[in-house]
Image (tube, helix red, strand yellow):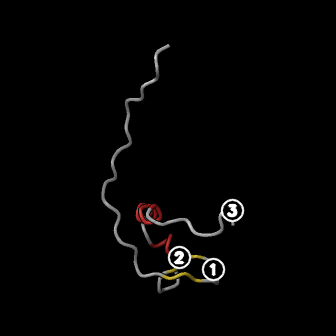
């Protein structure tokens, strides 16, 4: 049996992700918001959010805590 070789590759991103706008964590909504009160995820391009979250270390409790 011959192995399956996939010939397609994912297309490279069209542009690099930009920096995140000024934001802070709001305890009332449990999310990051920009100064005017809108959710950060609704203000910024999804590609920018994805690039930012890839650079962060996971926080919170671990299984051995």
Disc 2 secondary structure class: loop
Mark drawn on residue 39: 2
Which residue is farthest bottom? 35
State the residue position of label 1: 29
Q: Residue 5 lies in what quarter of the image?
A: top left
| Chain-order first, disc 1 or disc 3 | 1
Which residue is farthest front? 64
Q: Residue at x 46, y 23 (%)?
A: 4
Circles 1, 2 touching at the beta carbon (< 8 Å) = yes
Disc 3 secondary structure class: loop
* Separation of residues labelled 1 and 2 (CA atoms): 9 Å
Q: Residues within 10 Å of mark 1 (few under 14, many from 20)?
A: few
Where 45 falls versus 2 (above or below)? below
Q: Residues within 10 Å of mark 3 (few under 14, many from 20)?
A: few
* Separation of residues labelled 1 and 3 (CA atoms): 29 Å
User: Horizontal and vertical percent for residue 29?
Assistant: 63, 79
Q: Residue at x 52, y 84 (%)?
A: 37
Circles 1, 3 touching at the beta carbon (< 8 Å) = no
User: Horizontal and vertical percent for residue 60?
Assistant: 62, 69
* Quarter of the figure with the C terminus: bottom right
Q: Residues within 10 Å of mark 2 (few under 14, many from 20)?
A: some
Q: Residue at x 43, y 66 (%)?
A: 52
Relative depth, front residue between 43 and 52: 52
- Nearer the observer, disc 2 or disc 3? 3
| Chain-order first, disc 2 or disc 3 | 2
State the residue position of label 3: 64
């Amino acid at each position: 049996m011959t192995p399956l070789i996939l010939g397609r590759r994912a297309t490279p991103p069209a542009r690099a992700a930009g920096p995140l706008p000024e934001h802070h964590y709001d305890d009332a909504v449990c999310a990051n918001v920009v100064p005017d009160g809108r959710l950060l995820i609704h203000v910024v391009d999804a590609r920018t959010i994805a690039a930012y979250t890839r650079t962060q270390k996971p926080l919170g409790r671990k299984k051995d805590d």
